[in-house]
């Protein structure tokens, strides 16, 4: 089967940098996606890695290493509005999500 | 606003009942995905339709079924409801239907409460 592991909670202060790790097990996938979800809201797409390496999108970057079955989402210059849940997801026929990491940003 | 609409927003019903959730994808998107989000199971893929045809199945119970209509809107039917079916149900759409639909657009969800 497919499974993903990510920390359940992360806390940080405004302006800081935080990294959310994701390890996975799968027999095959196209890439690793990251989604953000504010409390009770719709998940929204953040980033996607089809290949190994770093993808940068503004304050957010995502990394994938297929050989290590590992990826991470890096959030820089944290803002209060970044407080949300972040999900890594294996991309295949559909998205297989991890359980999510709740990020709390304080002032 | 993702452009995906879902109705109703909230639904409260009793055990044993049947409900229908409706989803309209973004204009031009041919694929619709249904997901269930509960506190203990997280966000789980249920089923995908592409241009009216079932394309992939995930952890969908036999009591649940879905279809996609010629106008591309989709309905998720949940029957013989149990307390454990209480969850947020999301649909998402994407332009294509093949593998690797990494960027999906999620609707606001339907919160189902079974009492």
Image: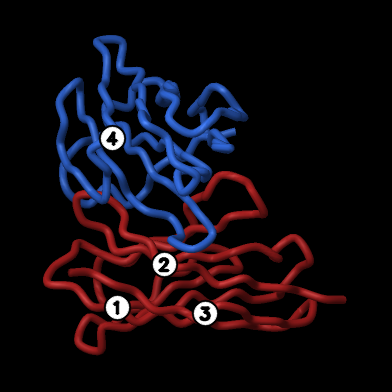
Chain colours: A red, B blue
Q: Mark 3 or mark 2, which has the lower sequence index?
A: 3
Q: Are marks 4 and 1 on the same chain?
A: no
Q: Residue at x 55, y 72 (%)?
A: A101
Location of mark 2 (residue):
A88
Q: Are marks 4 and 2 on the same chain?
A: no
Dot 2 and dot 1 residues touching (CB under 8 Å): yes
Location of mark 4 (residue):
B63
Location of mark 3 (residue):
A20
Disc 1, SS:
strand
Measured in 3D between alpha carbons, the distance from the residue under mark 4 to the one under mark 1, in whole angstroms, is 30 Å
Measured in 3D between alpha carbons, the distance from the residue under mark 2 to the one under mark 1, in whole angstroms, is 9 Å
Quarter residue A55 falls in:
bottom left
Residue reaching furthest to the front:
B16
Residue A24: assigned label: 1
Mark 4 or 3: in front is: 4
B82 or A47, which lies in front?
B82
Measured in 3D between alpha carbons, the distance from the residue under mark 1 to the one under mark 3, in whole angstroms, is 13 Å
Disc 4, SS:
loop
Q: Chain of mark 4?
A: B
Mark 1 or 3: in front is: 1
Residue B109: percent from the left, percent from the top?
54, 36
């Amino acid at each position: 089967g497919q499974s993903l592991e990510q920390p359940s909670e992360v806390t940080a202060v405004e302006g800081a940098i935080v990294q959310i790790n994701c390890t996975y097990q799968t027999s095959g996938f196209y890439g690793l996606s990251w989604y953000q979800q504010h409390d009770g809201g719709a998940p929204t797409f953040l980033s996607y890695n089809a290949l190994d390496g770093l993808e940068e999108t503004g304050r957010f970057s995502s990394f994938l290493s297929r050989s290590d079955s590992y990826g991470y989402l890096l959030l820089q210059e944290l803002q209060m509005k970044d407080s949300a849940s972040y999900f890594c997801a294996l991309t295949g026929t559909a998205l297989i999500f991890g359980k999510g990491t709740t990020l709390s940003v304080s002032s | 606003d993702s452009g995906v609409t879902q109705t109703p927003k909230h639904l409260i019903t009793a055990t044993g009942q049947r409900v229908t959730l409706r989803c309209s994808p973004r204009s031009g998107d041919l694929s619709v995905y249904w997901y269930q989000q509960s506190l203990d199971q997280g966000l789980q893929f249920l089923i995908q339709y592409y241009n009216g045809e079932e394309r992939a199945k995930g952890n969908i119970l036999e009591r649940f079924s879905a279809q996609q209509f010629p106008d591309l809107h989709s309905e998720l039917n949940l029957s013989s409801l149990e307390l454990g079916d209480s969850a947020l149900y999301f649909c998402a759409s994407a332009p294509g239907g093949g593998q690797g639909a990494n960027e999906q657009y999620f609707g606001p969800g339907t919160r189902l409460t079974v009492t």
